[in-house]
Amino acid sequence: MKRIVVIFLFIIGSNLSFSQQDSILKLDEVVVSDSRLLEFSNGIKITTITDSTLQRVPGGLTNALLFNSSVYFKENGYGMVSSPSFRGTGASQTAVIWNGINVNSQLNGQTDFNTILPQSFDKISVRSGGGSTQYGTGAVGGSIHLENSLDFAKPWTSVLNLGYGSFDTKNFNYKSKYGTDITALSVGLGHISSENDYKYLGTDKKNENGAFNNTAIDLGFGLLFSRTNLLKLQHSTFIGDRDFSGTLTAPSNSNYKNYNSKSLLEWVNYKKNKVQRTKLAYLYERNKYFANKNSDRFTTSNAKTILFNYDLKYSINNMLLNGLVDYNNVRGEGTSIVAVTRNVVATTFLFSHTVSNNFSYGVNLRKDWVTDYSSPFVYALDGKYKLTKNYAVTLNTSKNFRIPTFNDLYWETGGNKDLKPETSHQVEFGQIFNKKGVKAELYSYYTTNKDLIQWRPSSVSGVWSPINVKSVYQYGVESSITLHKKIKENPIVGTITYAYTKAIDKESGNQLMYVPFHKATGSLVYHYGKYKIGLQTLYNGLVFTTTDESQEVADYFIGNVTLEYDVINFFNTDVAIALSVNNILNTNYQNMAFRPMPNRNFKLQLNFKF
């Protein structure tokens, strides 16, 4: 296969008859699809999870973020539907950005984080706070950025992970990259399946209907077809087949099949002080729900999105000016919603100014025009100032909005066509200390929301339906300490995070459902010769499961331990073996009411790098 691809790339290169040019070596900015994340986020909190960490993540994106961010996740059992709560907001207020474009479901406005396998990505970033100006409706609480990079003029590299664990869990991940002077290719394949029949601790029951089978394919190709022009193609496909777990009080025999695909074609033209990007994307999502998996009867829905984006950026001395025009056409239909179409046009202006080595700031402005709603003008202001060599402060404020999704409006068993768009205002102050391998961060924020959309069960029928909560405010702190040290030349890396969140419905004075007051994580990785030992811990505070705070899910503490050994290096291939013990304390815990999570379990993995 390697020879075939090399021959293919050689033919392309020969036909184009281009040689390496010094003027095209500086490609860092143009090969990254989401360069705005760093260039226009001077005073924004951003947490990055690197490729080396992602390669060792078991399962879906939930596991990658659960122990590495302050985001709280609700899972309907392990591997089932997983949705985030970001600073007291819900899943629809968290945007997922894939290579620079928003890929939240057009049906429910959310992303199921267990339908994304993170091992094929080169980097995942968590951007805290409102991002409606850059990333559109839905980026109210924060955004998760999934990045695939292209490497030109790089030798062939590959990573292969094979794993087997408790509950008959099998995983396979392969990631490969290759680049010539004018072409770049990346391939990612991922698969995980499990019977997922873990015990419900404290009972004589087990997870009877939790099996899942997920597959992901990621492809990327880049072509420098002139000295100043780059063409990129990115594609991602996910195929999922899950039995949906029941609860402690109600068994389940349901099944859910979903198919998601994303294709992005991008042309980049770059000169000394100007970069133009044109993006054309097609997003498709389809799902089938079987209330009885042994029956042929099912409900279904699908959405098709065509996205066009033009992006023009100028750099003038120490200033960046960026103008964008977006057009989205969305068509959705299904068993439980009527066929609907929505068109969105947006214009955005971004400005960043590095005044000195110590001070930088940015101004972001945006206006949307939506088929069925009047969208407000939104803005964001941010800045960063270094008071000393090791100490800096940040400040940002923004106005954000979110329009109701198709499911919010048109779902036949609970949709509400009278919903209003939600708007919010937020302010955040941050402090960063960085010295000799120790980095400490502390952020405090305050957010007000008007007409927040929440799905709540009817007190009469029990059917869940969305309503506008008149007024909600959130405030809290997020902190982290990261340590990079060596003990007798042996590296040690440790991280501790803590988040405190208040999310209050002004009318009732109560905390919103499924928003924990406290979340803390800790991780430690120590290298000793060929050995590596890793420890992960997570504490989640209690959450209320009713609007009147009469019922709750208890707090819990869990820990995972991994021991890895570099077995051998032969023919330029590194081979390592890793044994993980998850939930090592065998904690009986839930993060959704009546839905137990796995007991103590084991995983053995072989890692190849060549």
Image (cartoon, rainbow, N blue to C red):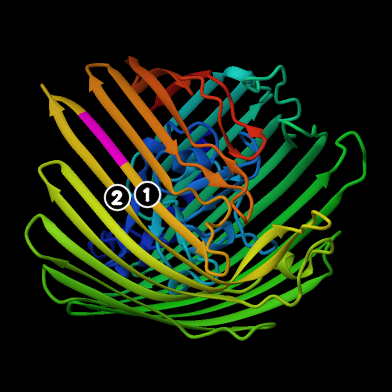
Residue lying at the far top of the rendered structure: 567
| SS at circle 1 | strand
Disc 2 + disc 1, Cβ < 8 Å: yes
Within-10-Å neighbours for mark 1: few <14, some 14–19, many 20+: many
Name the side, left or right, on which 261 lies relative to 358: right
Residue drawn at x 32%, y 70% is: 40
Res. 479 mark? 2
The overriding secondary structure of the stretch rendered in magenta is strand
Going 70% across and 76% down the picture, which residue do you hit?
A: 342
Where does the image place residue 253, in percent across and percent down from the top left?
Answer: 83, 34
Mark 1 lies on residue? 499
Residue 337 seen in this snapshot: yes
Whether residue 229 appears in magenta in the rendering, the answer is: no
Kindly identify the residue that appears in the image at 68 percent across and 83 percent down: 371
Question: Closest to the observer: 285 or 16?
Answer: 285
Q: Which portion, as a residue range, is magenta?
A: 492-496
